[in-house]
């Protein structure tokens, strides 16, 4: 049976996921969309057969043929949509963040536990990127020994006009938060943020770049350079330093050219290009798992942990202090 999906939020990510479900992946169709902006929802639905457009997420979830929900609305709208999907017993792929705040994430965590089964996959798509998967397998197999450090770089060509200093952590470094927990299989226990004098290319008032440091439960240290106005393109790198060697991703792929006395390669200009395959694989894996009655990928617990770490990160940004991460006890459902 083809899985009918209600897509909540038809902005940049939502519209891209609708395109992906409609024309890239198999086993699913977009049965309904919802957006507060009625015109946007209608425009997205108009290109798709048997797809209804709504302004109310609950109405989209109640539309005929809907068997699962993809939430791609703005972060503050996620909690209400998640609870609505829970009330209907619908499996969910929720774009990151699960919720922007730890309190909201905890409420979602408690609501899912009351259901007694997992319904949510959080959209941390790096877990579906081929290079990240190879690095994760290498670390898990242990051939390089125990990981001691991760050196991460996360660079964007330019930040959008609405980007704030807090968003460097909550919107960007949140991906390194999840990648660190997943690659190392450890929790992040403390965060520090060092702030160099901002780049003269950063918009007025934006503290860009920053160096974010994590300590983990297994004694590793992780540094993340976040630089959202680097000017030259989108670049995500990670080097794991282990007891018997190193492994790195993100620096060498892509087409190489030699011309006019120079050798080089193209640098993708944004995440939709760099992680295009990861988004496709993420949504396909979610559809496949949902049709088989399974849930995989980042869980509600992972979304909750990311929210708590980001909250600590923002406090570290503001105070310049080392901030400890205090997680609730991990429920058995997420063992
Ligand atoms: P966007 O602003 O382009 O789109 C958000 C849409 O949600 C808008 O059309 C808005 O009208 C709609 N919306 C807001 N509240 C709503 C509500 N209550 N009900 C229905 N619709 C509502 O933003 P975006 O860039 O598409 O981001 C959407 C989500 O995707 C965010 O959670 C963001 O963090 C996430 N995101 C993830 C990645 C990734 O790499 N995984 C990248 C970008 C964005």
Image (cartoon, rainbow, N blue to C red):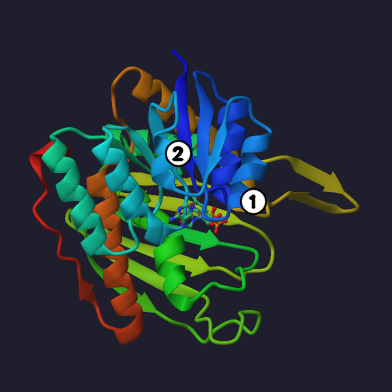
In the image, residue 284 lies at what x, y percent?
48, 27
Q: In which quarter of the image is residue 85?
A: top left
Classify mark 1 as within 8 Å of ligand 1 or not, answering yes or no: no
Q: In which quarter of the image is residue 223?
A: bottom left
Q: Residue 137 carries which label?
A: none
In the image, residue 261 lies at what x, y percent?
87, 53
Taking depth in this image into account, of 155 and 149 the one nearest to the observer is 155
Q: Residue furthest top?
A: 1
Q: Mark 1 points at which residue?
A: 39
Residue placed at 68% from the left, 54% from the top? Answer: 269
In the image, residue 33 lies at what x, y percent?
52, 40
Taking depth in this image into account, of 31 and 93 the one nearest to the observer is 31
Taking depth in this image into account, of 33 and 272 the one nearest to the observer is 33
307 sits to left or right of 153 = left
Cα separation between marks 1 and 2: 15 Å
In the image, residue 23 lies at what x, y percent?
63, 26
143 sits to left or right of 189 = right
Q: Residue 60 carries which label?
A: 2
Q: How crowded is mark 1: few (under 14 residues within 10 Å), some or many (20 or more)?
A: few
Q: Is residue 156 visible?
A: yes
Residue placed at 54% from the left, 84% from the top? Answer: 198
The answer to whether the residue labelled 1 contacts the one labelled 2, judged by CB atoms less than 8 Å apart, is no
Mark found first going from the N terminus, 1 or 2: 1
Taking depth in this image into account, of 189 and 17 the one nearest to the observer is 17
Residue placed at 45% from the left, 39% from the top? Answer: 60
Q: Circle 2 — which element?
A: helix
């Amino acid at each position: 049976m083809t899985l009918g999906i209600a897509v909540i939020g038809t902005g940049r990510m939502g519209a891209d996921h609708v395109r992906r479900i409609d024309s890239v992946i198999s086993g699913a169709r977009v049965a309904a969309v919802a957006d507060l902006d009625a015109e946007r929802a209608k425009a997205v639905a108009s290109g798709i057969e048997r797809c209804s457009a709504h302004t109310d997420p609950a109405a989209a979830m109640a539309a005929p043929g809907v068997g699962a929900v993809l939430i791609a609305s703005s972060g503050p709208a996620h909690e209400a949509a998640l609870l609505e999907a829970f009330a209907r017993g619908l499996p969910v792929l929720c774009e990151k963040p699960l919720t922007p705040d730890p309190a909201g994430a905890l409420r979602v965590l408690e609501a899912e536990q009351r259901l007694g089964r997992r319904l949510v996959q959080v959209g941390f798509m790096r877990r579906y990127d081929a290079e990240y998967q190879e690095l994760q397998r290498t670390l898990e197999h242990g051939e390089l020994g125990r990981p001691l450090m991760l050196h991460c770089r996360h660079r964007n060509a330019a930040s959008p006009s609405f980007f704030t200093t807090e968003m460097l952590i909550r919107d960007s470094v949140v991906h390194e938060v999840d990648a660190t927990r997943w690659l190392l299989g450890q929790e992040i226990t403390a965060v520090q943020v060092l702030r160099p004098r901002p780049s003269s290319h950063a918009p007025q008032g934006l503290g860009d770049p920053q160096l974010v440091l994590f300590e983990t439960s297994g004694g590793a240290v992780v540094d993340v350079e976040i630089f959202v106005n680097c000017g030259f393109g989108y670049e995500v790198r990670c080097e794991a330093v282990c007891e018997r060697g190193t492994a790195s991703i993100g620096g060498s792929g892509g087409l190489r050219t030699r011309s006019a006395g120079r050798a080089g390669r193209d640098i993708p200009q944004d995440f939709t290009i760099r992680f295009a395959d990861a988004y496709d694989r993420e949504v396909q894996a979610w559809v496949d798992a949902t049709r088989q009655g399974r849930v995989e990928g980042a869980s509600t617990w992972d979304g909750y942990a990311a929210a708590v770490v980001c909250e600590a990160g923002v406090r570290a940004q503001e105070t310049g202090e080392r901030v400890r991460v205090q997680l609730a006890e991990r429920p058995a459902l997420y063992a």
